[in-house]
Amino acid sequence: MIAELGLAALWLATALAALQMVAGALGVRQGGAQAAIYARPAAVVQAFLAVLAFVLLLYAFAITDLSIKLVATHSHSAKPFIYKLTGTWGNHEGSMLLWIAVLALSGGLLAGLERRLPETTMSATLGVQGFVALGFYAFLLLSSNPFERLPVPVPEGSGLNPLLQDIGLAIHPPTLYVGYVGLSVAFSLCMGALITRAVNPDFAKVMRPWVLGAWVFLTFGIAAGSYWAYYELGWGGWWFWDPVENSSLMPWLAATALLHSVSVLAARDALRTWTIMLGVVAFSMSMLGTFLVRSGVLTSVHAFAVDPERGTFILVLLGLYIGGALAIFAVRASSIAEGKRFTWTSREGALVFNNVMLSAILAIVLLGTLYPLLTEAFDVRVSVGPPYFNPASAIFAIPMFLVMAVGPLLRWKDDSPKRIQFELALLAAVVIGVIALVAVLGDYAVLPVLGLALSVGLAIAAFLPLRGRKLGRVPTATWGMIMAHFGVAVSLFGMASESAFTSEKLAAVAPGGREEVAGWTIELQSVDPVAGPNWTAVEARILASRGDGEPTLLTPQARNFWAPPQATSESALITRWDGQLYAVIGDQAGVDAAGNTRWQLRVWWKPFVTFIWYGGLLIALGGVLAIVGRIEVDLRRRRAARLATQRREDIEALSAGRAPEPAE
């Protein structure tokens, strides 16, 4: 019954998406009237049905309904309940249904709540959103049906990939999907404004919260995914430039540029063409990421599908959406007004420069991600990793950070560097001083040293816009900008410190043996067998102490899951304010002279590595503060408008000899 209800809800939602698309198109031709009658209700009801379908699938996983093929192949009755739930989106079909549910819910909220756009523009926007949704519904129903039934229910399920049986899976994928879907709404708004020739500040004010919300969720999702891979995969790294990792980074880079462009368009009526193009590019990158993860062209712990037919389907959707958007842009580009002019020595100029830098970094990541796939098509295997990505992206990231430090200090439209010469001199002195200090302390690679210097400079620069202002009167949105920029500095400091100062120890140790790493004393007490609900493991008991401090117990494990069969390495961490001690246990490594079994231990001391994720949280928090600030501004404007209307009505009433109406 669950499968039948879920499938029926999806088919009805598909029909409503088609109705929304057609009604939106007719609404543009008829001045918006048709959309007002059909498109908005269709979007709202479609949202309810899509969410209902996902809730039904969630319930099927919760009760382990083994008559449904997806549950049977990705769940197990012995699996902990929380992982039964997260298993709903820990597979291709379920994650696509979650994607579509969030997409439909976003469209429903847009249709139900937004009243600031002209009706024709809203009709075009809802029509495009319906078109996007219709493609994904077709993909789900025709090639990835999550409610497919088995002829005969199986006695037991196959289980979820053990690497995905982690609480991080409850956070990482859903936040990324919300970010991706937010970019789809931004794309629809861009196309709606372009079709109806309404690319102006009013459209940007409607679009900005969607972009900002998508950017916040992408930031948090990428940070959460990075930390999950760091502690779960057991290799000690926080970013490997894996193609699937890059597939989430590329939309974030585009969304960061789009966020700044749409903010300038909303506030200063500039960067109109930039905003439209970046809206298309950001959505294109989210679609490309979907293709990479679900096409089968990649082998990764992050990838979901190995079916090339599904990849072809997504590639067709990518061609339809992006090809159609570029065609509309080519036809309508001449109708986009220029907007207000500005000089390069202005805040707008700094934002444009950094948008170019972000676009260049995006191109580098895109090339490095796709190049191995292209060469593999000609039977040539090429590996592209940190030796390419790090220096190539740094070429553009370094000037971007320098301009990012100075940009918020500049005035809008036009300014002179002489006005901020004190701030420029201060930042230059700080950067040069940090470089000199690190050079004196040791011989380190160039990029980490530059990263440390720039991070300190950015941290100071983030708060310079507060100079000479009363803190109590600083707008919340400005605090959001400061927090986000400071978060970038904190993350950059963590990245540079981890790269420059990490110490590693790989040793074969018998119980009772000791090793030293970066001032820490590591003593292996014992290695014991342990068991969990659906796994067995060997667990090392390690005492770690630094200096005269009290020892702390570490318990890394080498696990073996039986549903499905797979071996994993579970790291153990000690977190201190200045870094993390990271330990994993490997295989047996023979015996020592006394006949005791030795075990492979790998231990890292990673100075300030946690700052990477603290910074990511600060960046996301800055985005949240910016959203709150925009809401505050909007509420104040509405209140001012109501008061103005009330005063005007009072004056008219007094002029007519009537008593004014009492204020609400």
Image (spheres, rainbow, N blue to C red):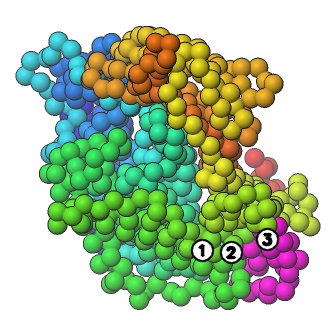
Indicate the quadrant containing the N terminus: top left, top right, bottom left or bottom right: top left
Question: For residue 426, what is the image quadrant?
Answer: bottom right
Mark 3 or mark 2, whichever is nearer to me: 3
Residue 354: assigned label: 1
Residue at x 37%, y 83% (from the top left corner)? 332
**Disc on the earlier residue, 3 or 2:** 2
Q: Is residue 322 visible?
A: yes
**Disc on the earlier residue, 1 or 3:** 1
**Disc on the earlier residue, 1 or 2:** 1
Q: Residues within 10 Å of mark 1 (few under 14, many from 20)?
A: many
What is the CA distance from the residue labelled 1 to the residue labelled 2?
7 Å
Q: Is residue 167 visible?
A: no
Kind of residue at badge 2? Val
Q: Tell me residue 101's x, y (percent).
A: 36, 41
What range of the chain is rendered magenta? 406-434
Image side of residue 527 versus residue 535, left or right: right
Q: Tell me residue 47's x, y (percent).
A: 37, 43
